[in-house]
Amino acid sequence: MNFLPEKEVPSALNPRRATLGIRPHDIQIVAPGTGDENAYVELVESRGSEQLVYLCLRGNNQGPAIRVVAPPETRVAPEQTVGLGFDRERLHWFEPEGGRRVE
């Protein structure tokens, strides 16, 4: 699972910051600026039926590392900036101080 600390929990009743957890299969690579985050591609590993893409949110190992499992036809290359789209149905939220799941 990928963990992105200090994200705003989408809640009108109780807005607060928490750690976002999202699995590599639940992230889609999109055009830069059109997703939830932009990321810098570090490495692309072709596995035949899928690609394992290693990214960094702030470029050149300066931010959280992210892994994405992408379809083989996804055009992505190292040293490229891409957008990341998160599947809203599959987000997991955790309290920063205790790792408890946010409801």
Image (cartoon, grey):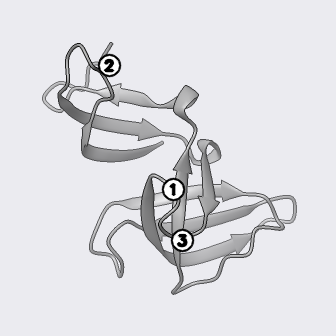
* Dot in front, 3 or 1: 1
Residue 46 spot, x, y in % from top left: 76, 71
What is the quadrant of residue 43 in the picture?
bottom right
Mark 2–mark 3 contact, CB under 8 Å? no
Is residue 10 positioned above or below 83 on the image? above
At 32% from the left and 19% from the top, the residue drawn is: 101
Q: Residue furthest left?
A: 97
**Distance CA(mark 2)–CA(mark 3):** 29 Å
Q: Secondary structure at mark 3?
A: strand
* Dot in front, 2 or 3: 3
Residue 30 spot, x, y in % from top left: 62, 62
**Distance CA(mark 2)–CA(mark 1):** 24 Å
Label 3 neighbourhood size at 10 Å, few (<14), some (14-19), many (20+)?
Answer: many
Q: Which residue is mark 2?
A: 101
Residue 24 spot, x, y in % from top left: 58, 48
- Labelled disc at residue 82: 3
Label 2 neighbourhood size at 10 Å, few (<14), some (14-19), many (20+)?
Answer: some
Q: Which residue is mark 1?
A: 35
The three-letter code of the residue at mark 2 reads Arg
Q: Is residue 55 left or right of residue 3?
A: right
At 39% from the left and 62% from the top, the residue drawn is: 65
Q: Is residue 89 left or right of residue 76?
A: left
Is residue 2 positioned above or below 96 on the image? below
The three-letter code of the residue at mark 1 reads Gly
